[in-house]
Amino acid sequence: MAEMTLRWIETDGVRLCELTELAALKARTDGFLWLDIPEWSEEAEQILADTFKFHPMAVHDSRERNHVPRVHVYADHLFIVVHAPEIGTAGHVHYLELDQFVGKNYLVTVHGPLNPVVPLEAALQETSQVVARMEAGRLHPTSPFGLSYAIVSTIIRRQSALVAELARQVGLLEQQVMLAASNEEPHEFLTQLFTARHELLTIRTMASQGGEIYHRAIKVTTFAPEEATKLMADLLDQYERVSHISQSQLDFLMGVTEFYRARSDTKMTIAAERLAVIAALTLPITSLSSVLGMNVIVNASTHWVALGILVAIMLVISAILLRWAKRQGWW
């Protein structure tokens, strides 16, 4: 099990601390602390409930999986749940949950329960990148809201990068459709189209819901400084941008899919019409031969005159039906 990490962040940089220092750091005002909890444990629950005295509902939401993002606003802190996407097998998109307690002098991040097939490293991507940037001196957050902004912005960049990759895949699929190079295995090609649609739809849903959460947080938060409100407003704008781009890409993909399906349906319709023509042409021949054939062609003798008349009648009927089908534009 991955251990919790406690960091103290101030103007001079970031310092890794022991968990025994948590109470002392929490009382300081010359910087702020960041407690990151990769996996849930009884110790983590005790720290959240006893040391920070977070609301039992928020602690419960940190322990359990949340299928939609959420926000709880308290007098001195925010509890925010967001999700990051992770593409799995067969087009399945995993929801990687990140819970945040954002206060005036602390940020507590809790990584939600994971599907067993998802490695922990995938859930820690954003926080690990932020740590690397701070340790390299490229990121200098001055408040818990600034640090939260950096983490969530990294999540949004992951969403945006996945949308860009899916847009590349959709472009390749569109080329196959326009070049009529996708006719050999139509069911497999349709699976690719609808898999890309599902992935885009999932990312758009994440972005749209994340934007709604920050819209609510901006609206009801009263303790946060003006700078924090501006940071949350920027996160809202980023979420909306990803949502709109995802939707436009979805619209394009649906256009490609409809074009492909229309062409496939047209081919099936034409094939059905030709089969109907064949059936119509052979029906009178089949009828005559089945009714009269046994009477004009027999083992003892054959009625050649009657047989000739029947064959002529069959040819005339077939020609008439063929000419009629031609006038109808069926072939």
Image (cartoon, rainbow, N blue to C red):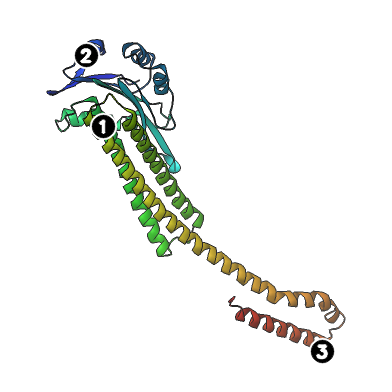
Q: Which residue in the rendered view is the most extreme toward the left?
A: 12
Mark nearer the N terminus (3 vs 1): 1
> Residue placed farthest to the right in the image?
300
Tell me the SS state at disc 3: helix
Amino acid at pointer 1: Thr
Residue 213 to residue 32: above or below: below
Residue 252, position as x, y percentages in the image: 39, 55
Question: Label 2, on which residue?
Answer: 25
Which badge, 2 or 3, is on the more N-terminal residue? 2
Question: Amino acid type of disc 3?
Answer: Val
Q: Residue at x 38, y 30 (%)?
A: 97
Residue located at (42% from left, 48% from top):
196
Residue toward you, 239 or 310: 239
Label 3: few (<14), some (14–19) or many (≥20) C-alpha neighbours in 10 Å: few
Q: Viewer-proximal residue, 187 or 50? A: 50
Q: Residue at x 68, y 72 (%)?
A: 279
Image location of residue 177, percent across then percent down: 42, 61
Res. 127 image quadrant: top left
In the displayed structure, would residue 20 be above or below residue 210? above
The disc label shown at residue 305, or none = 3
**Badge number at residue 142:** none
Q: Mark 2 to mark 1: distance in Å?
A: 25 Å
Q: Nearer the viewer, mark 2 or mark 3?
A: 2
Q: Earlier in the sequence, mark 2 or mark 1?
A: 2
Circles 3 and 1 in contact, beta carbons < 8 Å: no
Above or below residue 304? Residue 6 is above
Residue 24 percent across, percent down from the top left? 22, 10
Residue named by callout 1: 229
Image position of 313 (left or right of 43): right
User: What is the secondary structure assignment of the residue under circle 2?
Assistant: helix
- Measured along the vertical axis of the image, is residue 36 above or below residue 22? below
